[in-house]
Image (cartoon, rainbow, N blue to C red):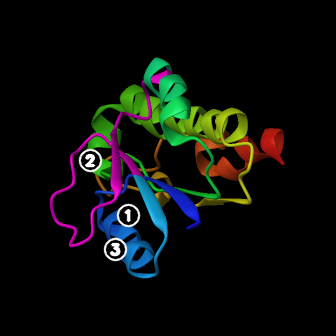
Amino acid sequence: MATRVLVTGGMGFIGSHLVEALLKEGYEVFVLDRHVPSRFDEKPIVINADIIDKKRLDSVADELGSIDYVFHLAAQVSVAFGEKNPDENRKINVEGTGNVLELANTACQSLRQKSFAWNIAIFSMSRLSGPSMFTALDRNPEMMLFRYS
């Protein structure tokens, strides 16, 4: 039986390359993304969902079954968007990550390892607006993991 991997944000720049590499290595790959993939030679199993939609993620657990690894790469990475829409940025990156952690924790009981690539956009500063107004949790997202470790 192939190792089963969930990649959130699997259509993004990093996520799509990770999915491609995992498929080539023979993993059974599930992509959770708002966008439907079209560029892969080998097709992953696609779950169309947004990480901020908690109800949808709760239903995703049934679709996934047993997952061995989760790579959480879904994020809002535009600094400009984040500066103009700080509440929406926080909702996507912080609450969305919390939703993915809940999915991994409650629905994927066989999970062997939780791997996270954090969005570095939260550490950025704009020359126009100065330091970003993000919270301590935004700047230290690993604090969120303590609940699950």
- Tell me which numbered mark, 2 or 1, is placed earlier along the sequence: 1
**Amino acid type, residue under disc 3 in the picture:** Glu
Q: Quadrant of residue 144?
A: top right
Disc 3 to disc 1: CB gap under 8 Å: no
**Mark 2 residue element:** helix
In the image, residue 33 lies in the stretch drawn in magenta: yes
- Residue furthest left in the image: 38
Q: Residue at x 16, y 65 (%)?
A: 39
Q: Is residue 118 visible?
A: no
- Give the extent of the magenta segment: 31-54
**Amino acid type, residue under disc 2 in the picture:** Ala
**Amino acid type, residue under disc 1 in the picture:** Gly
Image coordinates of residue 101 in percent, x first then y, are: 64, 40
| Other residues around mark 1 within 10 Å, as few (<14) / some (14–19) / many (≥20) | many
Residue holding disc 1: 15
Asked whether 16 or 145 is in front, the reply is 16
Instruction: Find residue 20 and name its label.
Output: 3
- Tell me which numbered mark, 2 or 3, is placed earlier along the sequence: 3
Asked whether 83 or 103 is in front, the reply is 103
Q: Residue at x 23, y 44 (%)?
A: 35
**Image vertical order of residue 73 relative to residue 134, above or below:** below
**Image vertical order of residue 73 relative to residue 81, above or below:** below
Q: Quadrant of residue 138?
A: top right
**Image vertical order of residue 140 relative to residue 20, above or below:** above
Residue holding disc 2: 80
In the image, residue 34 lies in the stretch drawn in magenta: yes
Q: Quadrant of residue 21?
A: bottom left
Using the numbered discs, state the Cα–Cα distance from disc 2 to disc 1 in whole angstroms: 21 Å
- Residue furthest front in the image: 1
Disc number lying in front (2 or 1) = 1
**Mark 3 residue element:** helix
Q: Classify the position of the N terminus by image quarter.
A: bottom right
